[in-house]
Each structure stands twice: as structure tokens, then as C-alpha cells.
Amino acid sequence: MAGELSCTNMFHCLSNKMKMGEEEPNLLKVTEEVSSVVRNDDCVAEQFQPGTKISIELQQKHIQELRNSLSSVKSGMEQLRIQYSEDFTKIGRQLYILSNAASGYHKVLEDNRKLYNQIQDLKGNIRVYCRVRPFLPGQANSSSSVAGMEERTITIITPTKYGKDGSKSFTFNKVFGPAATQEEVFSDMQPLIRSVLDGFNVCIFAYGQTGSGKTYTMSGPNVLSEKSVGVNYRALNDLFNLQAQRKGTINYEISVQMIEIYNEQVRDLLQDSTLEIRNTSQKGLAVPDASIVPVTSTSDVAELMNQGQKNRVVGSTAINDRSSRSHSCLTVHVQGHDLTSGTILRACMHLVDLAGSERVDKSEVVGDRLKEALYINKSLSALGDVIASLAQKNSHVPYRNSKLTQLLQDSLGGQAKTLMFVHISPEPDVVNETISTLKFAERVASVELGAAKANKEGGEVRELKEQIAWLKAALVKKEGEPENIQSTQSSPNIYGINKGNATPVFRKNRQPMEDVGNLEVTLFQPSQLFL
Ligand SMILES: Nc1ncnc2c1ncn2[C@@H]1O[C@H](COP(=O)(O)OP(=O)(O)OP(=O)(O)O)[C@@H](O)[C@H]1O
């Protein structure tokens, strides 16, 4: 009886373990346990009477059957194990091949992207990125005017025409959907932003109708967090990091200006005063009178941005409470001195948040607000005209038609790298605005400006240019001072050495040189002339 129990228990135990799929070492252990029970049962059988003997024999028969099935299970398991291990090896090999193919595919994609960007760089196309704003909290988001999005294409459901709905697709350098994060957006434009440290002028401008997310992209939402800060903060932060990394090879000085164009008046946001745009591209400063403040950390920048934001003209329209009725521009000036080659570079980056591009009738405005809207429309259409004449490669480009185009002149027609960030709202009731925005953006994308050039020059070229400039200046000064001819002949003062109260030929600081473009020239020391 004891044998029967232990055998049955063992059988259950064995089958349970097999059901549970325990590993083979366990199975072998169980097998040994069963065998030992069976051996014990054999001994027990000899001690019983004939009646019980039959049942013992029966049990022994069962046990034998069990043994047989156990050994067939064992060999089955062994075969399974071999089969599994072969399958695993095969799967491993296939996974290896697949992962190689996948990484190759990603590399090809990455190479394609780089090549595409290089072609863009060579042609100097204005890059155009498109961003779709998500529906805002509390808005019904059952239907969107965006029918589909791919990496570079966006499809919009066009309004019913002649009784049937249609769709229209637009292709740009990159399309960001409503779920795109600030980090994703920034990381895509990061290489462009970084090129300012290599001497390229950069311009990024946010375009779109009121409330489509321009300020969100450039600065961030009203309440800022590390995750939600926009391009402006991230760009400066990135430049500071690079500045620190390159310390020892290149010394960079970074400074910022913040201006606003409101009703065709240029205002300094860091001083709250009115200014003029001047054609002073040689100095790299479109608005030389605006305060230019050196910055060394993100907290400096945050402080300045707060100050600038307070001075911004913010109105309220029927479309968006937080609507800004002016174009704002944060300009980052960078000057670098390569400590090994002596090269000096100077570049600037305009980060522009344009005023809303919606039509006047949509804004339901009158009085001052109407005046603002008209100015905005005027400057944006001047921007459109400039873009159109650049696209047609006209000899005359009407930059002077608005303050905005005057400000962006160097970035649009010069040798800058330009990115337009076009924003659209997903609501179907503004689809006409969305389509006209995207059409404008498509035209911008077709403009080829020619390859951008870095504003840097090697030490030797710079020195030669400095010498020429210095000699020219000395000549002009001598020509204007005939009474000094005698004294100059007897005691040459062509180095501009200050004699008594006479004004020195050069001022103490750096002197801009016309033909050096953005380069700022270090004061030429007379003693260097004959070195
Ligand atoms: N990508 C986004 N994710 C979340 N909220 C967004 C996004 N884009 C915009 N918003 C929100 O939408 C509202 C309008 O955005 P924003 O003020 O940036 O528009 P705008 O185009 O700058 O308008 P304006 O022309 O008036 O300056 C804000 O509340 C903003 O926080």
C-alpha cells in the first residue's frame, strides 16, 4: 500500500513537473526518485501474500509501463532539447543578419539625410520646417485639417470645392507632428545653430498665423520648465556648452541684442527705446544702436529674456489672448579667436518670432488693433515679395520695403544659413489660412541663395588687410594735413604715433574694415608693419 501511494504520488509529482515545463536537471532528479521508489516497491512485493501479490505484480507492470513511458519521455525531451538548441542557434544567426541589415539601413538613411543636407547647403536653399500645433486643452479635437504626415510631407484636407472634398500635400525639409517635443525640434536644428560658432550667419524665423505656436517653438509656453523651453534658450545653452568645450583652442565671446518691430518702428527690448536699422552689414550689426549685452550663462540669458518680454508689445485679438502683435528678434553675436591659427571669426544668429500672419478680417479688429494688423500684413507681404524676387533671381530685391526685410537682409540674400519654421493650427475652421501659410512656405523652400560662407580669415590674410587699411588711413590723414608734410618728412609719423594733443590715427579699440565683411580687425600696431 505504501508502495502504491508513494508510486502514485511520484507519478503525480513527475507529471506535474513535466506539465510545469521544469528544466531537464529537475526531470533527471525526478527520474532518479521514481527509480528508487520502484526499487523499493520490488522489495516490498516479495514480503506480501498471493492475493496481494497479484496487485503488486499489477503495480509492477504499471511501474514497468511507467519506466517505459518515462524513458520515452526522456528521449523525447532530449530530442526536443536538441531541436530547441538548433532552432535557437538558427534564430540567433538570423537575428544577427537582421540586426546587421537594420543598422545598415539606418546608416543608409543617415547618409541620405547628410547628403540631402549637403545638397541643401551647396544650393543654399532656405530650409523649411513645418510644425503642427496640438489641439489646446478644452478644444474639441474630433477632426483635424491634417490628413496625414510623413517625415517630409504633410497632407491637408482642403475645403469642399464643387461639392467634393480633396486633399493637398506639401513637402518640406522636415515635418513635426503635434506630439513632437521641444527637444526633438531643437535637436533637428542643432547642427545649423552650432555653425554660428564656425563663422556662419544663421537666421531662424518662425512664421504662421496667430496662435499656431510660433512663440511656443521659439521661447516656450507661458510657464517654462526644463522640458518646455524653446529654441532660443536651448540654442544659447548649446553655444555656452560648446564655448566651454573649445576653451583652450578658440576663445568665444557671446553677446545678445533683443529688438522688436512694432508698427514699422524698431524698438530696443533691452532698453525700451526706439532705434533705426542701418545698412552696416560690414560690422555684422543690422541695428548697431541697440544695446548689446555680453552673456556667459543661461541665467544671464533668462534674465535678459524676461526683461525683453516685459517690454514686448502684447495685445489681445479675438483669435488668441496671448497674441503678440510685433516681430521680435533675438540676435546672438559671436566672436571667436582661434588661438592656434590666429583666425578671428565673427557671426550672428537671428532668432525671429514673427507676428501672426492671419488676414485682417479674421482678427475682428478695429482702431489700433487694425492699424497693427495692417502693419503686420504689410511687412509680411514685403517678406513675400523679397522671397519671390530671390526665387526669380531678380537683380533688384525690394529689401527696403519694410523694417523686417531690412533686418533680415543679410540672412535672406547674404551668405547666411536660413531656416523658416512654419507653424500651422489643426482646426478645420482655419484651413484656408493653413493652406495659404503652407503655400507661402513652399515658395520659400524653393529659394536658392547659394552656398553659405563662413566669416573667418586666417591670420596672414588678416594682417595683410590690416596693413592695407592702416596705410589707406594714414594716407588719408596725411592728405588732409598739408601743414604736417614737412614734419612728416623729417620725422615720419605714418604709424600714427600720438604727438602732444594730436588725435591718433587709430582709436584704442578694434576698427571695422569694410572689405572684410563680418570680420573685426584687431588694432594694427605700428611696430608690426615691418615684421
Ligand atoms: N507644440 C505645442 N504644444 C503644446 N502647446 C502648444 C504648442 N504650440 C502652441 N501651443 C500653445 O498654443 C497657444 C498659442 O501658441 P503661441 O502663443 O506660441 O502662438 P503664436 O503663433 O506665437 O501666436 P502669436 O502670433 O499671437 O504670437 C499657447 O497657449 C501655447 O502654449
Image: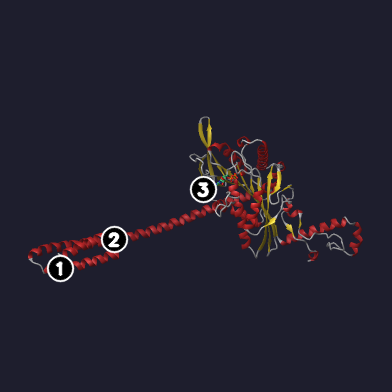
Residue in the foreground of this view, choosing between 309 and 235 = 309
Picture residue at 8% right of the left edge, 66% below the top: 49
Quickly name the residue at label 3. 179
Instruction: Looking at the image, tell me whether mark 3 or mark 2 is earlier in sequence order.
Output: 2
**Residue with the mark numbered 2:** 79
- Which of marks 1 and 2 precedes in the sequence? 1
For residue 395, above or below residue 114 = above
Describe residue 411's horizontal placement relative to residue 29 as left or right. Answer: right
Indicate the position of residue 83 as horizontal and vertical percent values.
32, 59
Q: Quadrant of the N terminus?
A: bottom left
Q: Tell me the amino acid under the disc marked 3.
A: Ala
Q: Is mark 1 within 8 Å of ligand 1?
A: no
| Between 416 and 18, the one nearer to me in the picture | 18
Residue in the image at 18% along x and 68% along y:
39
Q: CA distance from mark 3 to mark 2?
A: 51 Å
Q: Nearer the viewer, residue 498 or 270?
A: 270
Image coords of residue 528 (percent x, y): 78, 65
Residue 355 as seen in the image, left or right of residue 503:
left
Hey, what amino acid is under mark 1?
Asp
Residue 226 coordinates in the image, percent (x, y): 56, 55
Rounded to the nearest whole Å, what is the CA distance between mark 1 and mark 3?
Answer: 74 Å
